[in-house]
Image (cartoon, coloured by chain):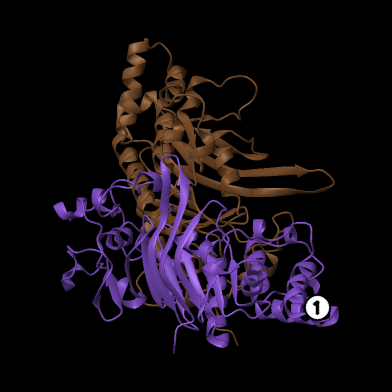
Chain colours: A purple, B brown
Amino acid sequence: MSDLLDVRDLRVELPGPRGPMPVVDGVSFSVRPGEVFGVAGESGSGKTMTALALLGLLPRDAAVGGEALLEGQDLLRLRGADLREVRGRQVAMVFQDPLTSLHPMLTIEQQLTEHVRSHLHVSAAAARARAVELLTEVRMPDPAGSLRAYPHQFSGGMRQRIAIAIALACEPRLLIADEPTTALDVTVQAGILRLLDGLRRTQSLAVILITHDLGVLSSLADQVTVMYAGRVVESGPTGEVLPRPRHPYTRGLLDSLPHPEAAEDDPLRPIAGAPPSPSDRPAGCAFHPRCLYAVDACRSEVPDLVAVAAGRRLACPVDPLAAGEAAVG
Amino acid sequence: MSLLELRDVEVVYQRQGRPPVRAVAGASLTVDAGQIVGLVGETGCGKSSLARAAVGLVAPSAGEVWFDGRPLRALGRRSRDHREARVQMVFQNPFSSLNPRRRVGAQIADGLSILGGLSRSARNRQVGELLERVGLPPSAADRYPHEYSGGQRQRIAIARALAAEPAVVVLDEPLSALDASVQAQVANLLSRLSRELGVGMLLISHDLAIVRHVAQRTAVMYLGLVVESAPTRPLWEMPLHPYTEALIGSIPHADGAGRLPDPLAGEIPDPARPPHGCRFHPRCPYAFDRCRVESPPLVTAAPAREVACWLHEPGGELAPPSRRAQPVS
């Protein structure tokens, strides 16, 4: 199947205290219909800025470069009415905190039907019917009854279902979900992950899933891209990257996670140091000060992201984990 | 006798014109010297209220908190007896728990002044030692909190708590605002400090997986009650309470296997109107008649293992809930 979205060399710069700071620095990827494309990284890795750039939601003073082709149309060049037409109709977004993304003073019905009517130009009755249908689709208990309620009357998990229903209202081709389950409890998170999985299977919805949680990513994403300091350091099929990471950062991130099958009192294995701030990135590979395998070249040359196996790309010329014995265990 | 002992603690919040909320409905817990006890549960289960009662920030409306052989009085207008300052607390968000306008060293020295009788040079030396203990350079004393990242600020908050030479530290979600690689560093720091200093810790967290690596004993709370308490390893190997089983089952694994975690049916009920009988029965896959009418007490099912579930009886054969449950006819 051909690509739905093709992002090439995306760059985002924000003004900083010492000149422009590159927060996204040459990111390329493509997403197919029905695919869940995972973007992983810690705070400041540029994963959210990547998503905001695709939706034209960056701060005004941000400079954007590169292209993001959604079926041939460059999202980064859209302005005004054209942008609004694509945003909501073809690309929709779900944010981390549904309490801030839902309007606190409007009923669920108002928020759902406004969206449906402005994009699809249907009657009030048809919009209401569509609203009930959407709430049923996201498995809200009592869909018709929920229409009259306000966001504060729902729990976090139910609010996120409502936010997903609003995002799906106009049957978008692509859903961008930025930390959609981070604010939720694990038992509720499991329900939202199943819901997203069902949607991509039944509606061939493509999902860009942005998360710091590799467990969430592992359960849902087909492809994973790991970002560090604004750049992609490793990408490939989830089923290959997570069990056999090649980049020292990916490996370090996996090692620092609590492992469900680890022995009791086994200390966690963190990565030393902390991610650099965008205004203060080290020269060369941004990860080198924290990397156990860094050589001289890492301190001066920014490594390119190159293909290392079928579907796998890596930005580490040292490639210390290339041999099979590096499997996480 | 344990160092910190909570006996049938209840925390009730009065609300104007509405029924009071029993956030903690009779919970018991003990923490020994040098032991880390994890207290896990989802949003609204009362774990933070229980933590606040444990340090005296709220007065329990029933039950008792004992510390070092004496009842611990809740904080009032008068300053506390110095003996009671040996229970300290670390909060979730180090951005709000540290004063942005005071130097790091001065804030840590507050804790030392409780002990009193120190010259300025002795105090400065001790501040430096405390900073080194949590993995920061002594020079950090002259800086301000904003100069540090989230993980480093949490280290500062821990150093401040340690300044009063506490016997017990209660930590309310100290890891959840941190990135994965940094979270592991702070988790390991807690393990090391409790081992080296013999400090008892009550670690409140919604993240079971991280508690597993740090805590020797884990207590699980649901809707104001401790439903299971056991040494961490057996709890993971064979959870006895159906809620513990559901919590463990809903944790996503970062193994790249693409397994969706199991959601738990239903939502956490309103603590102001808890269900009759066992509070978990409306969501429990094994609930039978007795669960709907009678609330199960926390009983010792095996040495050091306590569970509040009608599926288990004292001295009975230990088996997972699915094996203990009657087959549904």
State the residue at coordinates (17%, 62%): A318
Res B190 visible? yes
Q: Where is B37 relative to A52, above or below?
A: above
Q: Work out whether residue B99 or residue B210 is closer to the camera in this orientation and state it.
A: B99
x and y, in percent, of residue B258 in the image: 41, 77
Question: What residue does disc 1 label?
Answer: A128
> Pointer 1: residues within 10 angstroms few (<14), some, or many (20+)?
many
Three-letter amino acid code of the residue under disc 1: Arg
The image quadrant where one finds the C terminus of chain A is: bottom left
Res B267 visible? no
Label 1 element class: helix
x and y, in percent, of residue B199 in the image: 37, 36
Q: Work out whether residue B136 or residue B35 is closer to the camera in this orientation and state it.
A: B136
Count of marks overlaid on the render: 1
The image quadrant where one finds the N terminus of chain A is: bottom left
Q: Quadrant of residue A322?
A: bottom left
Q: Work out whether residue A210 or residue B312 is closer to the camera in this orientation and state it.
A: A210
Q: Where is A1 relative to B70, above or below?
A: below
Q: Where is B156 relative to A7, above or below?
A: above
Q: Quadrant of residue A41?
A: bottom left
Q: Quadrant of residue A56?
A: bottom right
State the residue at coordinates (43%, 62%): A213
Q: Work out whether residue B289 or residue B88 is closer to the camera in this orientation and state it.
A: B88
State the residue at coordinates (37%, 47%): B187
- Chain where mark 1 sits: A
Q: Where is B53 relative to B255, above or below?
A: above
x and y, in percent, of residue A306 in the image: 26, 71
Residue B27 lies left or right of residue B214; in this view the side is right
x and y, in percent, of residue A50 in the image: 47, 63
State the residue at coordinates (41%, 37%): B148
Residue found at the far bottom of this picture:
A1
